[in-house]
Image: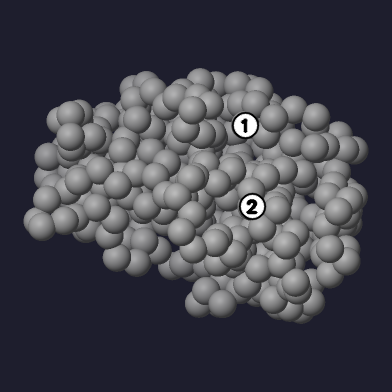
């Protein structure tokens, strides 16, 4: 999306009629930010409602939302940066980075982690009952190392795994010899000009222009922002805004930072998933919609729901950030907005 970065500062404000039509397609939520681009140009960008109900703070395109599992695309990118530098090999096994990992994990490779084919148990299911202190990456690693066996043999099938991307974040940290959140900030965010994006960990850093998560109780939206696993970095702690995410999309479109081979690997449909015929690349689902190749991911964590859907052959994308616990299918929400803002869009006279 070569033109997107240049268009960001001068994007026309959405007219009221279109903004209202978009709002009708959004689930009820305290706040929302929506971006659409088509043929490399911004065609819609609008913020709705409140980033923080408690303090009556409005959402803007600069509001930073927790991206939840949409963060996995950044983790995969960080891994491939180190592949390009010869510090990680996709066929490296877990015991290279975690020498004390049980023998059942010695055949699990970095490639298995990237494609959700590792067979690792879900670390969330291993958290002891009664745990009240927030876990970090090392806690998750230790929970996995204490597991007696995998869910299945590596490569046997696809099963979505937060555990795999948690370990990938740690592998980046070990291979680069730099804290994972600092590596992403210095090697991805800074070169792309994503100056307000951050991998947030409570007590470690802060989020500027922060959207807080909310849940509905007794007819009111109340803050519900962190969980026991919200500090685990590799699988979902990126905070970013429409303004900064636009720079990420531009960087992907321009093939910045990585080699051509690594970009090809990220966006190759490596393995079929259980998601309506979609395949998985590295950090992205890959399928088609309306006859267009689609590369997408959703995010779902306490207080936040998101979807990012890109259509690379058309140089188009739709990004939806919500800060409320809602049950709507975010893939469907994104599709309906893509229909309105991209596929059925009426060009200006």
Is 322 on the left-hand or right-hand side of 279? Answer: left
Q: Nearer the viewer, mark 1 or mark 2?
A: 2
Q: Which mark is residue 204?
A: none
Residue 237 coordinates in the image, percent (x, y): 51, 41
What residue lies at 80% left-to-right and 55% top-to-bottom?
A: 110
What residue lies at 39% left-to-right and 45% top-to-bottom?
A: 226
Which residue is labeled 1 in the image?
Answer: 181
Residue 77 coordinates in the image, percent (x, y): 68, 42
Tag 1's secondary structure? Answer: helix
Q: Mark 1 and mark 2: span between their CA atoms?
A: 16 Å
Residue 333 position (above or below residue 208): below
Residue 322 position (above or below residue 344): above
Quarter location, residue 7: top left
Mark 1 or mark 2: name the one nearer the start of the chain. 2
Is 13 on the left-hand or right-hand side of 288? Answer: left
Residue 154 position (above or below residue 108): below
Residue 111 coordinates in the image, percent (x, y): 79, 58
Q: Quadrant of the C terminus?
A: top left
Quarter location, residue 189: top right
Q: Is residue 201 in view from this perspective?
A: yes
What residue lies at 51% left-to-right and 34% top-to-bottom?
A: 201
Q: Is residue 347 in view from this perspective?
A: no
Q: Determine the residue located farthest toward the front in the rendered image.
A: 130
Tag 2's secondary structure? Answer: helix
Which residue is labeled 2 in the image?
Answer: 140
């Amino acid at each position: 999306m070569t033109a997107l970065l240049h268009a960001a500062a001068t994007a026309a404000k959405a007219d009221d009629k279109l903004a209202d039509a978009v709002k009708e397609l959004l689930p009820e939520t305290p706040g929302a930010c929506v971006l659409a681009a088509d043929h490399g140009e911004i065609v819609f960008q609008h913020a709705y409602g409140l980033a923080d109900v408690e303090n009556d703070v409005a959402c803007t395109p600069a509001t930073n939302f927790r991206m939840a599992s949409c963060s996995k695309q950044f983790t995969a990118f960080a891994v491939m940066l180190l592949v390009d530098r010869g510090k990680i090999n996709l066929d490296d096994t877990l015991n290279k980075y975690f020498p004390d990992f049980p023998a059942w994990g010695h055949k699990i490779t970095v490639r298995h982690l990237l494609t959700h084919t590792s067979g690792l148990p879900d670390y969330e299911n291993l958290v002891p009952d009664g745990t009240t202190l927030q876990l970090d990456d090392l806690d998750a690693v230790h929970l996995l190392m204490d597991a007696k066996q995998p869910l299945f043999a590596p490569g046997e099938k696809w099963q979505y795994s937060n555990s795999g991307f948690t370990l990938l974040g740690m592998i980046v940290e070990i291979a680069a010899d730099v804290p994972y959140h600092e590596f992403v900030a210095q090697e991805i965010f800074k070169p792309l000009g994503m100056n307000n994006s951050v991998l947030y960990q409570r007590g470690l850093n802060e989020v500027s222009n922060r959207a807080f998560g909310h849940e509905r109780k007794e007819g009111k939206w109340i803050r519900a922002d962190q969980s026991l696993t919200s500090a685990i970095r590799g699988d979902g702690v990126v905070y970013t805004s429409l303004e900064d995410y636009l720079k990420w999309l531009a960087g992907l479109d321009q093939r910045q930072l990585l080699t051509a081979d690594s970009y090809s690997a990220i966006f190759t449909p490596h393995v079929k998933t259980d998601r309506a015929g979609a395949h998985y690349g590295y950090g992205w689902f890959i399928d088609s919609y309306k006859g267009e190749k689609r590369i997408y991911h959703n995010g779902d964590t306490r207080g936040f729901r998101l979807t990012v859907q890109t259509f690379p052959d058309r140089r188009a994308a739709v990004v939806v950030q919500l800060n409320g616990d809602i049950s709507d299918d975010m893939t469907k929400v994104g599709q309906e907005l893509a229909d309105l803002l991209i596929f059925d869009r009426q060009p200006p006279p």
